[in-house]
Amino acid sequence: GAGVSQSPRYKVAKRGQDVALRCDPISGHVSLFWYQQALGQGPEFLTYFQNEAQLDKSGLPSDRFFAERPEGSVSTLKIQRTQQEDSAVYLCASSHGPKIGTYEQYFGPGTRLTVT
Amino acid sequence: AQSVTQPDIHITVSEGASLELRCNYSYGATPYLFWYVQSPGQGLQLLLKYFSGDTLVQGIKGFEAEFKRSQSSFNLRKPSVHWSDAAEYFCAVGESGNTPLVFGKGTRLSVIA
């Protein structure tokens, strides 16, 4: 079946531009996660949703970062006024959610954001 | 707070040799532990996971890992490495698989002939 998809796969933005990154989770998955992976580092948690509710956004690095999942399916991560330090791979993951007994997150291929 | 340490940044092994990648975690309760693999330009693929029960878990691609509570470790092993195993390996810990994961910094595996 289809996995997690993300678009665009690559994005180059000039400093100060706004960007929007899209995540399509696996159909039926309740939980959706965003992670940021800097070059040579492990992924770091940004935020996550259960259905349309954003349960935790403690990892968002600044108020320039905003995520939404209005219908409990597709999610968008928006970064306003991009800065060079925002350059990273942004990974999306989804999982069945707490009511089903499989406990693993499935990751998309990521969006590589380069801010020039 | 949860944390994961992968002490080895880069490991090189010969094809056919055995492999052990180290992972130590810090977590107050019984953790959910994961090993993921990432090939260049790819997302993360789950190799195996541990929640409870048998402390030796089998995963895909011939990998296994052993949970040792006394050592707070969850080391990944493979008896015979193939050239296609060259990739970045990440250990992760979470309260469950449905909560945010904390990842280590990763170990890059190179395989030589």
Image (cartoon, coloured by chain):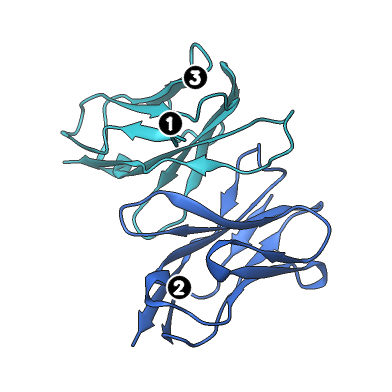
Chain colours: A cyan, B blue
Closer mark to the observer between disc 2 and disc 3: 3
Q: Residues within 10 Å of mark 3 (few under 14, many from 20)?
A: many
**Does the CB distance between marks 2 and 3 fall below 8 Å?**
no
- Helix, strand or loop status at disc 1: loop
- Helix, strand or loop status at disc 2: loop
Closer mark to the observer between disc 2 and disc 1: 2
Chain at numbered mark 1: A
For image coordinates 46% across by 55% down, the residue present is: A42
Disc 2 marks a residue whose amino acid type is: Ile
Q: How far across and how far down the image is residue A17, in percent?
A: 20, 26
Q: Residues within 10 Å of mark 2 (few under 14, many from 20)?
A: some
**Does the CB distance between marks 2 and 1 fall below 8 Å?**
no
Q: How far across and how far down the image is residue A64, in percent?
A: 37, 26
User: Among all residues in the image, which is located at the extreme front?
Assistant: A1
Chain at numbered mark 2: B
> Can you see residue B3?
yes
**Does the CB distance between marks 3 and 1 fall below 8 Å?**
no
Disc 3 marks a residue whose amino acid type is: Ser
The residue pinned by badge 3 equals: A73
Q: Nearer the viewer, residue B110 or A47?
A: B110
Q: Residues within 10 Å of mark 1 (few under 14, many from 20)?
A: few
Spatial CA distance of label 2 from label 1 is: 29 Å
Left or right: B20 in relation to B73: left
The residue pinned by badge 1 equals: A62
Is the residue B89 above or below the residue A33 in the image? below
Q: Are marks 2 and 1 on the same chain?
A: no
The residue pinned by badge 2 equals: B9
Q: Nearer the viewer, residue A47 or B32?
A: B32
Spatial CA distance of label 2 from label 3 is: 36 Å
- Helix, strand or loop status at disc 3: loop
Disc 1 marks a residue whose amino acid type is: Ser
